[in-house]
Image (spheres, rainbow, N blue to C red):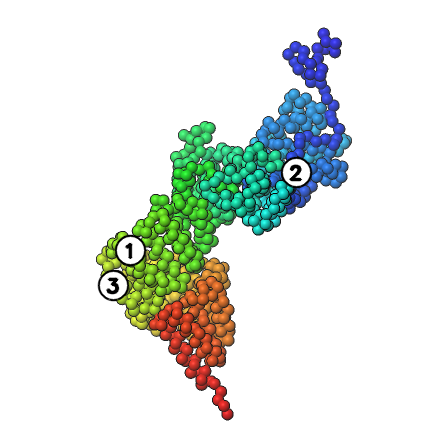
Amino acid sequence: MSAFGGGIAVGGDVHGDVTVKAYRPPVTWPHQVGVIPPRAGAFQRRVQAGWLGEAVAEGGTVVLCQVLSGMGGVGKTQLAAEYARMAWERGRESGGVDVLVWISAGSREAIVAAYAQAGADLCGADSGDADQAARAFLAWLQPKPGARPCRWLVVLDDVTDPAHLRGLWPPASPLGRVLVTTRRRDAALTGRGRVVSVGVFTEAEAVAYLTQALSAFGRSEPDGQLAALARDLGFLPLALAQAAAYLSDTLLSCAGYRALLAGRKGRLADLVPEDGALPDDQRATVAATWALSIEHADTLRPAGLARPMLHLTALLDPNGIPATVLTSQPALTYLTENRTPTSTGTSHLPDRVTAEDATLALRALHRLSLIDHAPATPHIAVRVHQLIQRATRDTLTPTRHDHLARTAADALTDAWPGIERDTGLAGALRANAAALTHAAEDALYRPDAHPVLFRTGRSLGEAGQVTAALTHFHRMAQAIYHHLGPDHPHTLITRSNLARWRGEAGDVAGAAAALEELLADMVRVLGPDHPDTLTTRHNIASWRGEAGDAAGAAAALEELLADVVRVLGSDHPDTLTTRSNLAYWRGEAGDVAGAAVAFEELLADVVRVLGSDHPDTLTTRHNLAGWRGEAGDVAGAAVAFEELLADVVRVLGSDHPDTLTTRNNLAHWRGRAGDAAGAVAALEELLADSVRVLGPDHPDTLTTRHNIAYWRGEAGDVAGAAAAFEELLADRVRVLGPDHPHTLTTRHNIAYWRGEAGDAAGAAAAFGKLLADVVRVLGPDHPHTLTTRSNLARWRIRATIDKPTDS
């Protein structure tokens, strides 16, 4: 028998097969369990720290997670550690604690082990039985009548799965606080208490951080370069820390680092210090930070879809991806074919991924803070940090990257409506197409030019951004020539689009000349009867008319019509379009009655072929009403536009650009019918909607302002008309340029209304200056040039008549 008796070993001695640990009395307060992470170098005190202090002070459980940025690396642990240090250092003061337990809560086992340590320290529990000791600690946290009050704080840092805390949540207590940091956004966590959202640094915080971090190594960089680097890194604290360390290790400049970061061949993982030299005792590089989160997301229902969904988002706009893009048929096909294999296999899963499955995959990524998913804003439903995108792209092989790029382009094209009724959606789609082109431009030209490239340019132009459309097709022409050569059909189509938007931007003669050159190549490569060749002839005729030769345009279209009917047939949409333009240019050439008759005949065929609600049918009715008015039936034109407006609203919607144009024309013909004041009132209502829908600088918005000024003058407010045109001129010069035909028209109206306001000499002088520019831009024989000369002569005569004579 042992000298201690009873066969019990004390102090860890072994007797038989049983090890029994000696009883250890509870520690005294204050007491800390676990180690608070040290403060990071160049630590920035952020506004969230104040929110956190307020939230914890209110009592209960606080979940510290990301909602804005939704990722690891934003500094949650540092904020929690700063608060914990503050609470510990205050001790018995207000806001202080008696017991602090810091737990690295990456697994249930880690949580139980930390609780067990606290149980052994604070209530003498047997640490050899971790589960029992953990339960003892949780019970000890419960307030007890008559017991000495203990203020405590439990920090659960980096909870990776809410299931890990099942049965392990500290009890609610007026004396206790719980602080959780996590990338998860499951209701099981966020429903426990107030959420403090932690996003990336502000630009000011990011620049301050980089300045301090680099100065610690004797480095300095211009604030402009630091701000640019911060933007390139998306203001992510972890990325900024590792970039600063990399700069200090390599002596590379900010500009040099940014060039490497912008390169498409380098990998994000190569732009951080070596693993053993990460700053602030960091355990993972930026690229590796999210790997575990992606693995977790892939295990959530529907299993295996989170990773391929993240792939799709990695090539699109980080600021917002429309939900319809990620649930489009091309996206669903990609998800079906690239589902991540799971540990249980995929044989039991449905053959085809549905739109509902895709949405659940987005929710899984959102729950792991890899994306922000906001279904309430469908046009920008998904946001993803640019570095998560970059890290995701880095995992793709070149072949898979290119396939993914074409898939993303297919998804954008599939989601892009033929009629852009929703300008917000159209803008979001253009932004996503631009992001895709930046990330994977080469893939969009292999094996040919993807339709999304053409759709983007057309959308820009139709949205009124004619200069942007021109720039887009100019850039596209250079790229397509390089990738596909001069004679590829897509190269020829790109040249056609470039010519069109050159004309829309004001260079009418240049557009016609470019199309003449293109026609020769079209005939050589495609043949004279190819539809694209016929379209080029059509466009040449139209721009010839815009350049002032209306009769020549009509003659060319009449010749073209015979060939279009022969090649495509009399009912082909292109044939109907040719007839429409032929009627229009006949009217412009002076045969207004003939134009009205031609549109009336055309309308019957368009309705028969396309239907009464087709947009081309509505356009034909629009043209018929206009030429009926020009032929003398002014009241009939106003009635026809009023009837048309109801159908346009029903078919296209109240905010569609064609609807706004119809309202504009209705007001015009009301004014022509004698109600100038009514025209002004209708146009002022229209202006508010044009600004809201199209923006203040859209050409159609400027046209509405032009018409308001005109009808204001016709209603008797001559001085107001002149002033309004003066204001409009500055905006037209800024938006369209000084030589755009619309700018010249505005100058023409300023001069006219100046004369009507009594300044005949000023009007004559203004028309004299205008004439030189009109001749230079439009040529001496353009109708607008002739009109300008006529007005110049008129106001010179008026100025002579009005000039006072010597007595």
Q: Position of residue 507 (x, y in %)?
A: 39, 63
> Which of these two is toward me, 27 or 456?
456
Can you say whether 652 is above or below 729 in the image? above
- Alpha-carbon distance for marks 3 and 2? 81 Å
In this rendering, would 65 be left or right of 397?
A: right
State which quarter of the image contains the N terminus. top right
- Alpha-carbon distance for marks 2 and 1? 68 Å
Query: Disc 2 vs disc 1: which is toward the camera?
Result: 1
Q: Position of residue 681 (x, y in %)?
A: 48, 69
Q: Earlier in the sequence, mark 2 or mark 1?
A: 2
Q: Position of residue 636 (x, y in %)?
A: 36, 70
Can you say whether 630 is above or below 138 in the image? below
Identify residue for label 3: 559
Q: Residue drawn 23% across and 61% down?
A: 562
> Which of these two is toward me, 521 or 627?
521
Q: Residue drawn 41% across and 80% down?
A: 794
Query: Disc 3 vs disc 2: which is toward the camera?
Result: 2
Q: Earlier in the sequence, mark 3 or mark 2?
A: 2
Identify residue for label 1: 521
Task: Identify the amino acid type marked 3.
Answer: Glu
Classed neighbour count for the residue bearing mark 1: other residues with Cα under 10 Å, few (<14), some (14–19), many (≥20): some
Task: Identify the amino acid type marked 1.
Answer: Asp
Task: Identify the amino acid type marked 2.
Answer: Arg
Identify residue for label 2: 39
Q: Is residue 387 visible?
A: yes
